[in-house]
Image (spheres, grey):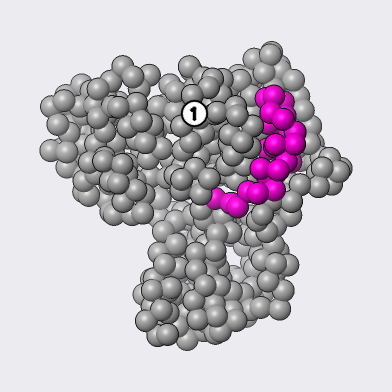
Amino acid sequence: MLDSFRHIHFIGIGGSGISSIAYLATAHRIKVTGSDVAESPITEGLKKEGIDVVIGHKKENLSDLVELVVYTEAIDQGKNPEFLEAKKRHIPMLSYFEAIGEISKNKKTIAVIGTHGKTTITAMLGQALSAAKLDPTVILGAQVSAFNNKNIRIGHSEWFVVEGCEYRKSFMSLKPFGAVLMSCEAEHLDYYKNEENYVNAFIEFVKKIPKDGFLVFNEDNSNSVKVSDYCAGQRIPVDSKLIKSLNIKPNVPGDFNKDNAVFAFVTAEIMGADEGLIKKELENFKGASRRLEIIGEVGGVTVISDYAHHPTEIQATLKALRKEYEGRRIICVYQPHQYARTLSIMNDLPDSFGDVDILIIPNIYAARDNEEDKKKINAEKLIKMISKKHPNAIWGEDFATTLDMLKKAVQKGDLLLIMGAGDVFEVGDQFIIDRLKTL
């Protein structure tokens, strides 16, 4: 698909997913330009590849030579000047997920799907297959050290491993040969409304797997089992007994990462990789960005950044850290992600932070939210709910206020956890910068 265009422009090129296609297009010697609302480590990395990245969206960013526009679904299509200009000029356009779908049509695609573990399993599987010389192309929503700190590994075989996103059924753009489903727990209820609709989306997806394809699924998860019944290809169950017997120990904390490793192992084995090579590589796995990532050790404080935003993920992450860093205080900055999503999980959040000594919650990260959602819930209301079970829960307001609180609260020997799917990682980066100035 990419090779038929000479110049592709990316709207929102700094996104964790869309940037991967920009890298891929550049590797195919296609002219790539792009824009985003702000500088970031991702935009800086793209510039180092020689990609022309402009900060700020304006119609002038689209040259007369642009032949295709790929855009992130985070933009407002009714207001974004570049999207409107492309539409006016009848330039072909694809969303990020549609572009991924086009790539998958010409590959033997393995999609990693589910509520939890997608990014890590995709990274593990891609790394294992690479070590086993299967040379896959891998695209996921985080940077991986084994992939030169990029969110893509560009391979030259028929295999394409991709992290599939279920939001708005985006993964339906893919043409899967196989899939990995570790969990299926109600999420994105601003779109799906209820668990049944959510599970039905996965059923619809696995129906696309051909008879000679396969599905690796979690036999201990009832929804995953239900979904697997609709797969026409080979069904390969993974359960706690298999996880225990294989006993794979990746170089990252958390029992859930041992689970992730087994799903990657089983999938790589089905794809023809050598068992010994797979296991060795998985036990060398050092994680992906913002997945229990240690971003700094400063003044006796360990700073960890994590993407968890769902109650189940939060509890699993905190359990892993409490076990790994036994005896140390855990100070957590948790940024709720989306007002509508926060509203759907708010009754489960108060029980999610039992392993935290001090909890600071800054304002909710807004994404695709309407004014009605914002009236129903905010960080201050959330703190009032959580503080009934957690006395050391504090409303952090904006990031500046949160950082002031951290300066007073964090002591030598503490573990500082920065958690959430929004831009809360900036708090961790700034904390390290500020802390270094005091040493």
Of the pair 244 and 179, the residue shown nearer to us: 244
- Which range is magenta? 260-288
Prevailing secondary structure class for the magenta stretch in the rendered image: helix
Of the pair 386 and 231, the residue shown nearer to us: 231
Assign a secondary structure to mark 1: loop
Residue 160 coordinates in the image, percent (x, y): 53, 26
Residue 336 coordinates in the image, percent (x, y): 50, 60
- Residue appearing at x 46%, y 48% in the figure: 149
Regarding residue 384, the answer to whether it shows in the image is no
Q: Quadrant of residue 311?
A: bottom right
- Residue appearing at x 65%, y 60% in the figure: 317
Of the pair 14 and 44, the residue shown nearer to us: 44
The correct choice, above or below, for 405 with respect to 148 in the image is: below
Assign the N terminus to one quadrant of the image.
top left
The correct choice, above or below, for 403 with respect to 137 in the image is: below
* Residue beneath disc 1: 155
In the rendered image, residue 241 lying in the magenta stretch gets the answer no
Instruction: Give amino acid for label 1.
Output: Gly
Regarding residue 321, the answer to whether it shows in the image is yes
- Residue appearing at x 81%, y 47% in the figure: 247
Q: Crowding near pointer 1: few (<14 within 10 Å), some, many (20+)?
A: some
The correct choice, above or below, for 418 with respect to 394 in the image is: above
Residue 51 coordinates in the image, percent (x, y): 26, 40
Residue 433 placement, left or right of 335? left
Q: Quadrant of residue 346?
A: bottom right
Assign the C terminus to one quadrant of the image.
bottom left
Residue 68 coordinates in the image, percent (x, y): 27, 25
Residue 433 placement, left or right of 226? left
In the rendered image, residue 265 lying in the magenta stretch gets the answer yes
- Residue appearing at x 49%, y 24% in the figure: 156
Residue 391 placement, left or right of 106? right
